[in-house]
Image (cartoon, helix red, strand yellow):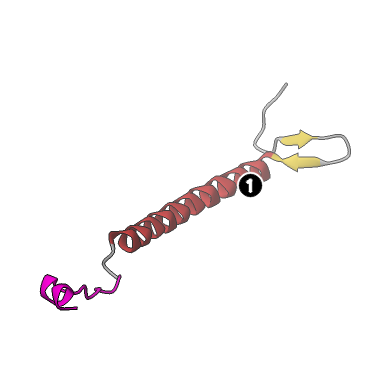
Amino acid sequence: MEHSVNSRLNLGLITIPQSLMTQTGTASILLLLLTHKATQSALCAMGQASEEIFRGASLPILNFPNEDELSRS
């Protein structure tokens, strides 16, 4: 079996060049890495936002009556 620069994958009726297979594989891995980075940053931002909600920084301040006001009524 001889390897050449123009080697092809023979699938019966279709022959696919090896360079096309390499380009497709490289593009899919790069797309996967970019998707992973975008998903990771989005999940991190969502986690920080939910942490702010549960911390109570954005909750309103409630006015509770003093002990003096309770004893007068």
| Category of crowding for the residue at label 1, using alpha-carbon neighbours closer than 10 angstroms: few (below 14), some (14–19), many (at least 20) | few
In this rendered view, identify the residue nearer to me: 1 or 11: 11
* Residue 67: in magenta span: yes
Instruction: Name which residue lies at 65% across and 37% down.
Output: 5
> For residue 2, what is the image quadrant?
top right
Instruction: Name which residue lies at 47% across and 54% down.
Output: 39
Q: Quadrant of the C terminus?
A: bottom left
Under mark 1, the amino acid is Thr
> For residue 8, what is the image quadrant?
top right
- Does the magenta stretch mainly form a helix, a strand or a loop? loop
Q: Quadrant of the N terminus?
A: top right
In this rendered view, identify the residue nearer to me: 22 or 29: 29
Instruction: Name which residue lies at 19% across and 74% down.
Output: 65
| Rendered location of residue 4, percent (x, y) | 67, 32
Residue at the limit of the structure toward the right, as seen here: 13
With respect to residue 62, does 28 lie above or below?
above
With respect to residue 58, does 35 lie above or below?
above
| Rendered location of residue 38, percent (x, y) | 45, 56
How many numbered markers are drawn? 1
Q: Is residue 11 left or right of residue 33?
A: right
| Rendered location of residue 6, percent (x, y) | 69, 39
Specify start and end residues of the magenta stretch as a single range. 59-73
Please name the residue that numbered disc 1 is placed on: 24
The secondary structure type at the circle numbered 1 is helix
Q: Is residue 22 left or right of residue 30?
A: right
| Rendered location of residue 67, percent (x, y) | 13, 70
